[in-house]
Image: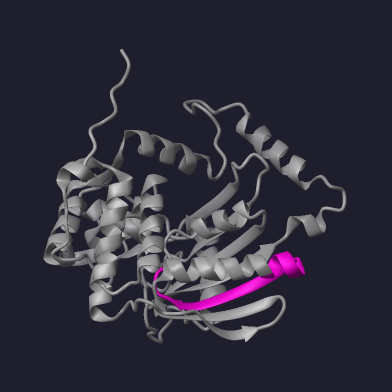
Amino acid sequence: MDEVLTNPDQVQRVLESILVADGCSGDEANVVAEHLVDASLKGHDSHGVIRILRYHEWLGTGQLKPRQPLKTILDTPALVQLDGGDGMGQRLAREATEIGIARARDQGAAILALRRAGHIGRLGAYAEQAAEAGFVSLQFCNVAGSRLVAPFGASQRCISTAPMAIGVPVADGRHFILDFATSLVAEGKALVAGTGGNPLQDDALVDGDGHLTGDPRALYGESLDGGVPNPRVGPGALRTMGNHKGSGLALACELLAGALTGNGTNGATDHPFGNGLLAIFVDPARLDDLDGFASEAAAYVDYVRNARPAAGVARVLTPGDKERMTAEARRKNGMPLSSVVFSAIRDVARDLSLPFNDSELLRAPAATAN
């Protein structure tokens, strides 16, 4: 893979300047850019810096709308329904999560329904936000207007990538953060592969005839040849993870985050693009009559980490561990971006007459000891 190592803080500065030039407020641009860089630092390049290219395009066409406030549709002590007005999803979801945490702190538990959030990015970020505040959370997400995935046994697109996340706070701060798309790979990983990044496994997609393939062109078609790749124009589809089990989870996300929130599902009716989110927040202290949750959770996670590794495995990891390790390494050694993406961001910045200094953005690999 042809890639460059970058300074994450300087990349964030460039992303913020692009978003402000595209109409976002300074605070909003900071939240979105911080989220994108954080996703790339943690190894989720599919939801990271590469997304700025699509956001720039969408802000230009009006598909994303800057400076949109959260609108309250329903407000009860334990149930809140919000509408994001097709705004910048990372800011909207962060604010919505703050509301869910506050309600759970007051009530013991809370259910939050958010619709029409433009694109909320890496779902695990909001599970992390809740866990840092000491709350358990369950998150279900769909992407209306984004038929990308074929359900088990089908070759037709019927589902979005439909991610879900579960966060459990752990006393030492190494929280349990389970975060995955219910597709075998996230659409963004296909985007990374199609723009010079790591290739996909050879069964990640089905082509137009229903045959297994790892070629991103099954999803993007000829749009990979120029401009911003469009995952809606290819003849094939992503596949669900876990065969019928993963397909069932994907359909559940569509029903909970799409139908129940009012965001819309990816059925025969076309809905405008946007994320729907159904999130449940629980204050573990309310259930902890034996005062044992913190020690039990920490002890069990460590027990699993210390399990005897299988052949060829260096150490056992729990959800969230790999992200923390990857972020530490990338902060130290530089954040990798494909050369294609780096050049495309440079082009956007220069088209907007924004400063773009390669020497500030690029970082040489850290020296290794002899």
| Quarter of image, res 102 | bottom right
Instruction: Inspect this view and state whether residue 262 appears.
Output: yes
Instruction: Inspect this view and state whether residue 219 appears.
Output: no
353 lies left or right of 288 = left
Percent across and percent down for residue 316 are: 55, 33
- Figure check: 168 above or below 141: above
Q: How is the image coloured?
A: one colour
Q: Residue at x 35, y 55 (%)?
A: 48
Percent across and percent down for residue 257 are: 53, 74
- Figure check: 98 above or below 327: below
Judging depth in this view, the residue of 26 and 108 nearest the camera is 26
Indicate whether residue 202 is drawn in magenta.
Answer: no
Percent across and percent down for residue 117 are: 44, 75
Q: Residue at x 35, y 59 (%)?
A: 33
Judging depth in this view, the residue of 92 and 219 nearest the camera is 92
Q: Residue at x 33, y 72 (%)?
A: 24
Indicate whether residue 117 is drawn in magenta.
Answer: yes
44 lies left or right of 233 = right
- Figure check: 352 above or below 14: below
The quadrant in which the C terminus is found is top left
Which residue range is magenta in the image? Answer: 103-119
40 lies left or right of 257 = left
Percent across and percent down for residue 69 are: 46, 80
